Amino acid sequence: MNYNQLVGNIRRKRSFLCVGLDTDIRKIPAHMADKEDAIFLFNKAIIDATAPYCVAYKPNLAFYESLGVEGWIALEKTLRYLKTDFPDQFVIADAKRGDIGNTSAMYARSFFEHLDVDAITVAPYMGEDSVTPFLGYDGKWVILLALTSNKGSHDFQLIEDRDGRRLFENVILKAGKWATADQLMFVVGATQGKLFEDIRAVAPDSFLLVPGVGAQGGSLEEVAKYGMNKDCGLLVNSSRGIIYASQGKDFAEAAAAEALKLRDQMSGLLSTYAGI
Amino acid sequence: MNYNQLVGNIRRKRSFLCVGLDTDIRKIPAHMADKEDAIFLFNKAIIDATAPYCVAYKPNLAFYESLGVEGWIALEKTLRYLKTDFPDQFVIADAKRGDIGNTSAMYARSFFEHLDVDAITVAPYMGEDSVTPFLGYDGKWVILLALTSNKGSHDFQLIEDRDGRRLFENVILKAGKWATADQLMFVVGATQGKLFEDIRAVAPDSFLLVPGVGAQGGSLEEVAKYGMNKDCGLLVNSSRGIIYASQGKDFAEAAAAEALKLRDQMSGLLSTYAGI
């Protein structure tokens, strides 16, 4: 999916919501957990219920890997279902990969050819040749960690260099030489509040993938206020707040209601802060 | 495996070699590639041939993930084979994971409970709460990226803070507060030469996992000269130089010969630089 298609979807659906498929076998409703294929069936129900209100889905690889072969099968089935039945959804593999060149190239093949997702999250620590192998695919995106949502984000990401530039700024500035805003997004946690202004100072045009609203405590209003640009430029993720909205048989309806609530809030924020 | 057991194995075998199982289906000998289970059979032959000369194996997850479900099955079979038939080998999942706390906890379960490896490589960018979930397992290790072997390592890892401390030094110093040398190693590329002295200044007692000899051009002699401590403190990895030493039917014998050559060199270096 390219930049214009993504912006088009956001305008049409009046939503910049990404639903995080952090599906944990121990948390899915009891009436489903015993079924063969429980993870996929749960994901399918969530997708069917929430698709009208979101523009992206983000399976977190850890949750599938923790189940070994069975988890990998559930992931592949989920991605195939999205690709076939919901081609308008932007699909992000939240994998936080990044390795030496020949290894990153293997990961790129795995995610962009075999799994055929639209984007993958990548960790920047190893530098240019760990990131560029992911950039050789038309219509496929790198989403580079910049300023994450967790407490530990302050350990290294805020370290200032001799010129007073913080590590997350160095990451954004340097990565801006490797790719344009048509292929490169950044992860910025919703918990970072006013720091979104500093992000926009170095990445005015880039899309930002924003985890951390809901369970992690970030404010959607603040994210939009400090982080939105004229094309929206935000994909805000919610995982647990949506997919575990109910533990009962009504889990899908409850997920839809949460997603709709966020969509309605987002619709207002798009008017207020992007004039769209 | 604990610190003393690892050092004991190194002394007994006079080797600090780690064999990297970066098994690429497109590179394994033609006579095997068609077989069902080709990846596992190749790994098994490499392990059987090289085990006398090494103390560790390091499958690189990217190479298995690139094959999807089939690759995951080959990885699980390889790990089970190592665990059962070679319990003295230190097994490292080269995965370079690292995510917010609850996600890192999922990865830790996946690698330490389900796959039951001894160690996992972890990326430090997200800070303390992305690393500590891996530290809650007795006898299991975190191997944190510090100064990697690739060209891009210079992009961020060498950035100096206001006190002149480089990022890789900040990573080592901070991580030293999260765990001791009994549970925490660092990745330092063999291509970094004299910088091993600077690593030892901040991590005198830690084991270092050292990729980058062979195909990537690092010098084993330099690594030992600048990086070895009194307990050796090094695990030097070679992947392509060993497992693809021959493309013919003699691939396992050729791999054994390469591993033996490195072991002999290592035996001399242990005498020279560690007096053991």
Image (cartoon, coloured by chain):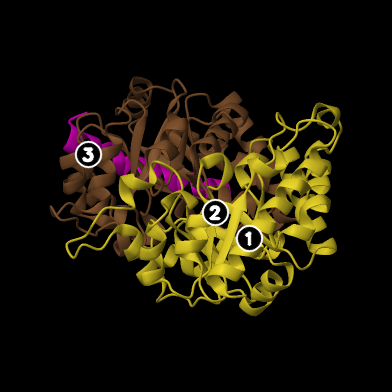
Chain colours: A yellow, B brown
> Nearest the camera: B200 or B86?
B200
Q: Are marks 1 and 2 in contact (CB under 8 Å)?
A: yes
Up/down of A55 relative to B110, above or below:
below
Q: Is residue A83 left or right of residue A209?
A: right
- Which image quarter is the N terminus of chain A in? bottom right
The answer to if B270 sits in the magenta stretch is yes
Sequence-first disc among 1 and 2: 2
Q: Which residue is mark 2?
A: A220
Indicate the amino acid at tag 3. Met
Which mark is on residue B228? 3
Residue displayed at 83% across by 52% down: A48
Magenta span covers which residues? B250-276
Q: Position of residue A227 (x, y in %)?
A: 47, 64
The answer to if A153 sits in the magenta stretch is no
How far apart in space, not on screen, are marks 1 and 2 (Cα)?
A: 8 Å
> Nearest the camera: A221 or B39?
A221
How far apart in space, not on screen, are marks 1 and 3 (Cα)?
A: 57 Å
- Which image quarter is the C terminus of chain A in? bottom right
Front: mark 1 or 3: 1
Give SS at disc 3.
Answer: loop
Front: mark 2 or 3: 2
Which mark is on residue A190? none
- Quarter occupied by residue A270: bottom right
Residue displayed at 54% across by 27% down: B86
Q: Position of residue B12 (x, y in %)?
A: 35, 24
Q: Chain of mark 1?
A: A
Q: Is residue B112 left or right of residue B191?
A: right
Q: Which residue is mark 1?
A: A266
Please rate how many residues cluster around mark 3, counting C-alpha atoms within 10 Å: few if below 14, some from 14 to 19, many from 20: many
Give SS at disc 1.
Answer: helix
